[in-house]
Amino acid sequence: MSKRIEKDQARFRNIIRGRVKQNLKKYITRGEMIGKRGKDFVSIPIDQVHIPKFRHDPRMGGGVGQGKGEKGTPVGQGDDPGHGQAGTAPGEHLMEVDVSLEELADMLAEELELPNIQPKGQKNIQSDKRVYTGISQAGPESLRHFKHTFKRALRRQIAAGNYDPKNPIIVPVREDRRYRTWKIKEEPVAKALIVYMMDVSGSMGEEQKEIVRLESFWIDTWLQRQYKNLETRYIIHDAVAHLVDRETFYTTRESGGTIISSAYKLVREMIEQDFPVDEWNIYFFHFSDGDNWGESDTNECFSILEKTLLPAANLFCYGQVESPYGSGQFIKDLRTHFQEEEKLVLSEIGDKEAIYNSIKEFLGKGR
Amino acid sequence: MSLPSEYRKWRDEIQGYAREYGLDFFETIFELITYEEINYIASYGGFPIRYPHWRFGMQYEELSKSYAYGLSKIYEMVINNDPCYAYLMKSNQMVDQKLVMAHVYAHCDFFKNNMYFSKTNRKMMDIMANHATQIERHIDRYGAETVENFIDSCLSIENLIEPHSVFNQPVAVEDEKPTDPNGSLDFRFHSEKTYLESYINPPEILEQKRKEWQEKQEKSRKKIPPHPQQDVLAFLLTHAPLEQWQYDILSIIREEAYYFAPQGQTKIMNEGWATYWHSKIMTTRVLSDAEIIDYADHHSGTVAASPGQLNPYRLGVELFKDIEDRWNKGKFGKEYDECDDYWTKKNWDKKLGLGREKIFEVRKMVNDVMFIDAFLTPEFVSEHLLFTYQHNASTGYYEISDREFKVVKQKLLQGLTNWGQPFIFVEDGNFLNRGELLLRHRHEGIDLNIEEAQDTLKNIYTIWNRPVNLESILGEKKVRFIFDGKEHSVKNIG
């Protein structure tokens, strides 16, 4: 395949990426792109890039078409429907570009000025990594070290007296060949767990869920960029808590009251069983409208937080979305109770527009 | 890749039929290529080598995607060049390949014989490759970003050329000089009666006249351009403060724009002509019984009219057929035009048999505008259900607005004249005596798209390097758009 067009294509994609980056804020607060999520990339709809020219106002022009219909029969909406101008380019339309999640995360980081995360020291988890360290006399041809090989050959030729500086031709023979060799090095790997908790009580409507969906998409994107090994768990709760899969997490709508401690208890259990604190970087994200059942339950929440969850966590983020019934008390209680606790991040998310700042609040600490 | 023997056999056979019917073409070279290659060549406008630019990449991305999703497929591509190059897609069936070959020979005939192509460069394949080399060299020297930005600016005005100018000899028009037989200036009234001299030619008046004339001379000498100029690119090439590489690029863009111009001017005719001939050759000579269904399917796909749209293939081929029919039957001329009996007109047949000859003449002499202007008839418009549509601001829809012959014809012509694009002229290269550029939009009932116009002005600024003005009419008010290098403004000029 010709390299020429590939270069042009790469250049074009670069331009597109620039556009996406410019408009990232718009995309963060809109859901379109998440629906189009592939395994490693998302498709982002953007306006077609075009070169401006002197053109007629399309709405004033009209044109000629062919077919049946009375006067006043609609033939199309928005864009110029027909070939009113035979021979000119087709009208403007949206096009989709694929952006890899990694790239998206980098854009997000740049846009929100997110610091890189410093993982907790994880000495006991190792992974093997190849490091090219030395030179040897045997090896696969694909790893041949040309510079060393020629140096050997030169040395041999000089020693043998058949090197002529005026006609500096060096011919390596079998014995001159040198190859790169590697050592296996063990490297600590950071593992991370994200636990999303969502209140699905009757007061959490579609719009609130949409906010949670958007926000967790971006959080996921970012943390995935930071950790190679990322586990995700989803928990929904009303008066009781359940561990569910991703699909259910976003679609379930329950009714009933809210007992937040039920979720915290479930999380505590999960961590104690499966995720030893010294091996895992643990992130909690809890979204609720903050209408907890009663003061006694709130107090129980505090004690679980203090004793288990906060010590285990890199970050505990609580986002309070505003439901049609107003915003609850829970965030205020948290704020007064944990004034000094820097692992706890609180954010009030009034509407979709607030997602942008909320992400920044959550992830801006670099933990 | 050289053609397999079956292809060669069919190529030679179809070429024979084409010649038998009187088509006259350059040598035509067919290449058999994959869909990837065809997408990539199509993104380059049919050429294997073009200069580096992102818009080709965009084209490629779109073509590849829509091919991958099965939304579109390129059947045929042919380049106006001597020899003509045409591409066949490997994965097509043989019956498609035959159809494409027949279609292509008619295109090549059109390229070779239509007057509007007569001035195009027939070695464009080489020229395009040279342009690529030239621009690549500039990129090496000045950087991809810089060069690409400049190309963007140039492309923004690539449509500001005058397609007919290739036929013109530039004529210098000068004011008539009042001279006496000795060749010196003479403003006197001449009279036999010499005693009237001091009355009819008082010296102070003569002196005044001389001064006026001189001033006028000076003024017109300073006016650049002397007359409004439609070829804005040529004007910029001569007068804009360009560095050598910029000059190079701008003239490359201009040359390519002129090369492509006739294809835009003859889209309906060219496609109509090729469709006419592929159907003639296929149905009378080539098709085997087994192929007829596939052929019919693909042919009807080519000429299909999607609801509410005008397909140039269809309009072209139907008009050619209509012309052939009319000239066969003698449905033209004074007698026919003046006849007002519907049935007499409908059954009119003088058995002239001039049809074939006429369409060959038409394909030689006219372009789309003249084609519609001269040969679109009221009968054709009503038979083919043509209508005009208009945007209805209250519903947001485009709606059918008229089926009247005159209105339809006028709208069609409006869409074709100057490719349906606004007329822009350079009015003054030293506007306000400050070296500003003044362009004028000749308003013909449709306003400009303001946002785009302003972006375009911005691009022209990067070429002209001084403030750029554009006079136009917006909602019946005369206005002047200005871009001064920093910001846009719009002035009402009464």
Image (cartoon, coloured by chain):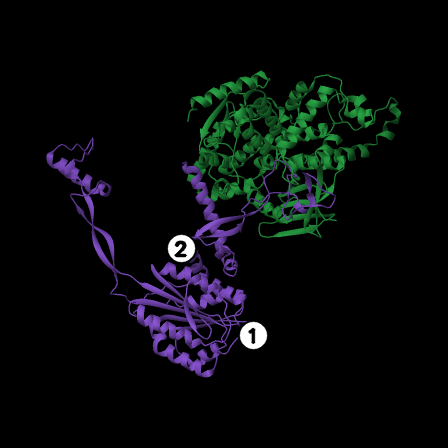
Chain colours: A purple, B green
Residue B142 in picture, x, y percent from top left: 44, 41
The disc placed on residue A325 is: 1
Whole-angstrom CA distance, mark 2 to mark 1, is: 38 Å
Residue drawn at 69 percent across, 24 percent down: B323
N-term-proximal mark, 2 vs 1: 2
As drawn, B189 above or below A81: above
Q: Kindly identify which residue carries mark 2.
A: A102
Task: Give the SS element for disc 2.
Answer: helix
Q: Tell which subunit mark 1 falls on.
A: A
Callout 2 touching callout 1 (CB < 8 Å): no
Secondary structure found at label 1? loop
Q: Quadrant of residue A145?
A: top left
Q: Relative to A62, is B244 on the left or the right?
A: left
Q: Residue at x 56, y 42 (%)?
A: B463
Chain letter of the residue carrying label 2? A
Viewer-side residue, B215 vs A131: A131
Side of B123 where A116 appears, left or right: left
